Each structure stands twice: as structure tokens, then as C-alpha cells.
Image (cartoon, rainbow, N blue to C red):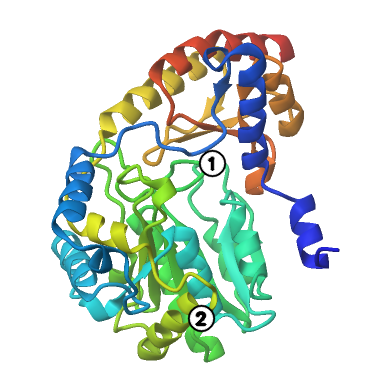
Amino acid sequence: MISTNMQEQVKNSSIIRAMFEEGKRLAKIYGAENVYDFSLGNPSVEPPEEVRKAIIEIVNQENAISIHGYMNNSGYEDVRTAIAASINNKFGTDFTHNNIVMTVGAAGGLNVIFKTLLNPQDEVIVFAPFFGEYRSYVKNYEGKLIVVAPNIVDFQPNLAEFKAKITPKTKAVIINSPNNPTGVIYSEETITKLSEILREKQKEFGTEIYIISDEPYRELAYEQAEVPYLTKYYDNTIVGYSFSKSLSLPGERIGYLVIPDQATDHEDIIAAANIATRILGFVNAPSLFQRVIAKCLDAKVDLETYNRNRELLYNELSTYGYGCIKPEGAFYLFVKTPIEDDIEFCNLAKKKNILVVPGTAFSCPGYMRIAYCVAYETIKKSLPGFKALIDEVK
């Protein structure tokens, strides 16, 4: 029999993944062109041409051992040096390769840093709505997730409640901006105030509280919106990054952690993160794609494709009477459901072959997430169904 812990995990398996599998089932019945699957944040934009060229160049010019062999658990030094230089150029920081740990995507990076930092019953604060897998990642290391209720006015963090929920057991705070599922970018004012609160609480309790900045959507920001780089606002910040969205490489599982010199006990954290990478079974980030992304740090996906989808979906749904905030980044629309029960509404949508994820999955009932990283024609063809849905429940 499987473990008690995994029995619970299976029972509460990701709603997002369940919707994705349901989409495949419906596609077999009705045809893929007649199923409108907005469930999964799976990029629909092709990777930049630089990625293909880099793969070919590396495979053709290097021998197999140099491409596929082991390396330091932190990753190739020259790759980490290139990443540090790229970050420094963009944000005016002063990182070196010693501050970078290559990871198996953002999820791998989060698990590494939680393994590194958390003692049993340490608390990790998160702002609703949030990516539901955070619960599992924290629980993996016997931590306790503390949820700050959503601010449904503008989805900036509720800082008053946040301050009240910090305790001597608080070890970390997860920041996800641009946010999944809302697409909201946390403002510089928000980040500045949040950092001030944490410095006050560290002093009050005599503890260290780390910000874990989960940034897979950093490069997906519209209309030249600025996404604050958090290490510049708070010393005890650790950044987790992924190339899954910025280069449309979700299946390649490649990302990194930034652990600044300014973070308390940074040398111990880096050493522990290396060991965590090994003993969690990652061993090291994928070797070929470390080499690939080092050649593509200035490459970008076609953001205009996502922006076109964003404009169409937001404008049309708003016209129909759906309520939502226009996303500033990522590729999600977080929409208030016309009825209180978001799960029931998403089930009604399924009857029209529209697959969306209930806000309950993100600890924000009464909403639904629509991932608009799909073909433009998929959105156009889905619109009559969205219109019929809201007309039926009014």
C-alpha cells in the first residue's frame, strides 16, 4: 500500500492536471478543434529561433561526454557566470557564478530551497490566490503553509493581514510576480512596504525571514510594465527562475536559484542547496539545456502573440459581463464567476467543451483561471460558449 502522505496527495491531485487530462478525453470524442482547453499554462508560442540554432551548434561541435556528463551540482561554472552577467546587466546587481545554482525548473528550485531552509513546522506565508503546488512543496519538508486572504480589489497582497500573520516560526514568504493566476505585477510600493514589514519582524523576533521570489513569468510583462527585482529591496531574498515560459521550454525543466551574498548565512545556504540538489535526486540540472540557455539569455518569445490573445479575451469577456482585472503579465485571466460556486460554473463550462480551472484551486473561490496561451482561433471559437454560459446563469 502507498504511504499515508501519498494517499492524501493522490486524493487531492492537481485540478489543473485533471482538467488537462479531461481535455484530451473530450478531444477524442468531439475533435481537438472543438474543445477549448484553457486549463494548463503550456506555452503556445514557439521557442525563439536562437534555441534551435544553439541545440544544433552544441550537438555538432561538442563531443558527447562534454554535453551529457556530470558536473558540479550547482551546474556548469561558465553557464552560471553567463547568467550572473545577464542578471547584472538587466538589474544593476553584482552577482557572480557563486550566487547561481542551476535547477530542474522553478519547481525543482523551490523544492531545493525549501529542503535547504525548512525545519518541521516552520511557517511559509503565501498570498492568495497562489499556485496550488506550493502546498505540496512546503509539505514535502514538513513545513506549514500560512495563507493570506486575497485582496480582490486589485490582487496586490493584503499587507495588514500579512503583518499580523508573521510569527517567530515564519521562515519564508513566497512572492510570485507576475502572478499565477491573476497576471498582476506586485508594485514597487507593495514590495517596499512588504520588505519594511519583514525587517521590522526580523528585528522583533530575532529571526531570519527569507523571501522566495518565484519568477517563471518575469519576462512576460505587457506594455513595458516594470517587475521589481526583489534582491534590491530586501537582503534575505532568494530568486527562483525558470526558462519554461520565457523561452517556451516547459518540458526541458531548466532554471536557476539566485542566492545573494547579502542573504544571511548565504554560504551555508549555497552549500546546502548543492547537497539538496543531489539528495533530492536531481543531481544536477539538465546538462544539454544548461549549455543551450547560456547561448539564449537575450532571446525572447513573441510576446505580441500572447498580448493579442489577452486583448481579445479580456475585451470580449468584459463586454459579456464577466468581471476581471486586466493582467499586466503572464498569460492568465482570473475571472469572477457569474455564480458563487466556481466549481459548479467550471463544470457547466465543460458541457460546452470549455475547460477552465476553478479559483478554489488557487485558494480564491468564486473565480476561474483562463490560460490564454493557446491559438488565437481557439479563443475566437470559444467566445460564443462563454457568452452562452453567462446568459444561462444570469
- Quadrant assignment for the N terminus: bottom right
* 91 displayed left or right of 340: left
- Amino acid on which the number 1 mark rests in the picture: Val
- Seen in the picture, residue 339 relative to 172 is either above or below; the reply is above
Quick one: 361 or 73, which is closer to the camera? 73
Q: Name the residue under label 2.
A: 116
Q: Which residue is found at the position 48% from the left and 69% from the top?
A: 282
User: Quarter of the image holding residue 84?
Assistant: bottom left
User: Counting residues from the N terminus, which is met first, the one under dot 2 or under dot 1?
Assistant: 2
Q: Where is residue 357 in the image (x, y as percent from the top left)?
A: 63, 35
One can see residue 3 in this view: yes
Q: Which of 269 and 292 is in front in this view?
A: 292
Task: Estimate the spatial distance between the alpha carbons at disc 2 and disc 1, rounded to whole Å.
Answer: 35 Å
Q: Crowding near pointer 1: few (<14 within 10 Å), some, many (20+)?
A: few
The residue that mark 1 highlights is 153
Q: Position of residue 15 (x, y in %)?
A: 68, 42
Left of 65 or right of it: where is 205? Answer: right
Q: Which residue is drawn at 80% across and 67% down?
A: 3
Farthest residue, direction right: 1
